[in-house]
Image (cartoon, rainbow, N blue to C red):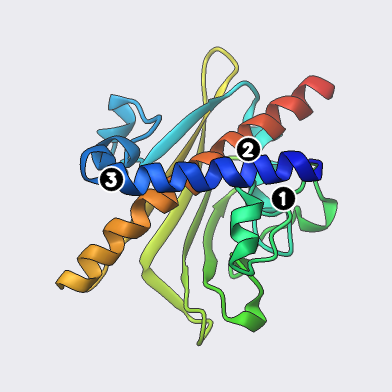
Amino acid sequence: MNVANDRLSTALGAINVALMALSAPVSRHWFNRWGATAAELASTLPYTRAITIKAPPSAIWPWLVQLGQGRGGLYSYDGLENMLGCDIHSANTILPAYQKLQVGDEILFGPAAKKFPGQLVLAIQPERAILMCGLNPASRQPETSATWVFVLEPQPNGTTRLLVRGRNAYAPGLANHLLWHLVEPVAFVMERRMLRGIKQRAERSQTHS
């Protein structure tokens, strides 16, 4: 991506964040279920968001396992993330060095030295699912009250549903309630961009294979 396109992407991302934050009182139900079907929402482990990708799980999996700062990036609005010092650079190619994701690996959202939060890999089912939990930025200890799971569901027509479920249990109280309602729309904008980024990359690599 060239500098002009990067700046445009960052500006559009900022506009999206602002719009979602302002409309959150009426759009929260929609963005917390973006892309998910009625069946997916009613499943045993209901999914938060989903997208259809015109590629098999084998073509999507390499992009998932290299997620993270200092790895393949987050495929979202790098410019917005880097304004916060995240030092994210989303890859447009599969990186062989980051294809062996293991339980216990850390998926960071920014440099560990700057105590950015991240995720700890709890379980992996190759070409099927990755389960992560929160990682305390100070102690680097797991926080199982926050979980993030990615699931690949192959479809009969050759496409794949990429399903994402995020959950975060916070202590009751007005301050936490208000804070989470501010965080949710921002998280939606960034995660939706990530899903679309994975879709774009996987479909492009499938076309060129």
Q: Nearer the viewer, mark 2 or mark 3?
A: 3
Decide if residue 104 is on the left or right side of residue 63.
left
Q: Is residue 152 visible?
A: yes
In front here: 86 or 96? 86
Question: In the image, what residue occupies the spot 56% across and 74% down?
Answer: 116
Image location (x, y in percent) of residue 206: 75, 25
Percent position of residue 80, x then y: 59, 55
Residues at marks 2 and 1 touching, judged by CB atoms closer than 8 Å? yes
Could you say which quadrant of the image residue 144 lies in?
bottom left
Going by the numbered disc 2, the residue's amino acid type is Gly
Q: Which residue is mark 1?
A: 90
| Residue at the image point whose x is 32% and y is 58% from the top | 182
Q: Quadrant of residue 148?
A: bottom left
Q: Secondary structure at mark 3?
A: helix
Q: Is residue 120 above or below residue 57?
A: below
Q: Earlier in the sequence, mark 1 or mark 3?
A: 3
Q: Residues within 10 Å of mark 2 (few under 14, many from 20)?
A: some
Distance from Cα at disc 1 to Cα at disc 3: 28 Å
Q: Which residue is mark 3?
A: 24
Q: Quadrant location of the C terminus?
A: top right
Determine the CA span between mark 2 and mark 1: 9 Å
The tag earlier along the polypeptide, 2 or 3, is 3
Other residues around mark 1 within 10 Å, as few (<14) / some (14–19) / many (≥20): many
- Tag 2 residue: 197
